Image: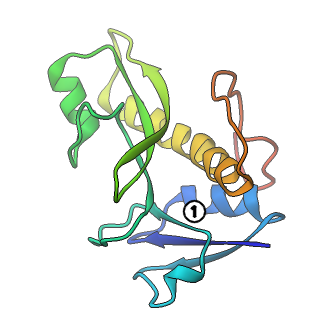
Amino acid sequence: MKKLAILYSEYSPVIDAIICQLEDIVEVDCFTNLPENYQIYDLVVSVNYRGEENIKLLKCHHSLLPSFNSDEPVKDAFLAGVKVTGITVYFTKPERIIAQYPLFIPNDAHFEDIEKQLCYLEQVIYPIVIEKLLKNEAFDLRNISNCGGCRGCSH
């Protein structure tokens, strides 16, 4: 069985979505600091982790990188007046984009609504990408409609 480490600084529903989607195929351990034995894990992912680690992490960012690579990407997108944002799943060290999923911003959109939609997308997309990476399978995010039957998901 594969091993997955989740690094986090504060609780996020994304953690539950990852565990729920992957519980049958992977052993998951959660940490607030990078464990000394992090090399035993097949994949180390970040969920709201604010530590600065000099290792290869899988992360999810609330913008279509390289645009709005900041701590407040949704705010920056609104201030720039863009009509498309989204999420990016990428590796650090070296930085490499793995997947992106767009979210169109309507003219009458409110900042909080877009932020909620991006958080929901992260709960859906991030576990799928992690699963496909662990299984070494290709993935297609074009027809995402739900999280795939997670028993803990409210959507």
- x and y, in percent, of residue 126 in the image: 57, 47
Secondary structure at badge 1 equals helix
Q: Quadrant of residue 80?
A: top left
Which quadrant does the C terminus fall into? top right
Q: Quadrant of residue 3?
A: bottom right
- Of residue 4 and residue 61, the one placed in the foreground of this image is 4
> Does 140 sit left or right of 51 as displayed?
right
Q: Quadrant of residue 142?
A: top right
Q: Residue at x 50, y 82 (%)?
A: 38
Which residue does the numbered mark 1 point to in the structure image? 15
> Does 43 sit left or right of 146 as displayed?
left
Q: Residue at x 82, y 44 (%)?
A: 149
- x and y, in percent, of residue 112 in the image: 35, 34
Q: Residues within 10 Å of mark 1 (few under 14, many from 20)?
A: some
Is the residue 144 above or below the residue 21 in the image? above
- Of residue 150 and residue 139, the one placed in the foreground of this image is 139
Which quadrant does the N terminus fall into? bottom right
Disc 1 residue type?
Answer: Ile
Q: Residue furthest left?
A: 79
Q: Residue furthest top?
A: 107
- x and y, in percent, of residue 11 in the image: 47, 68
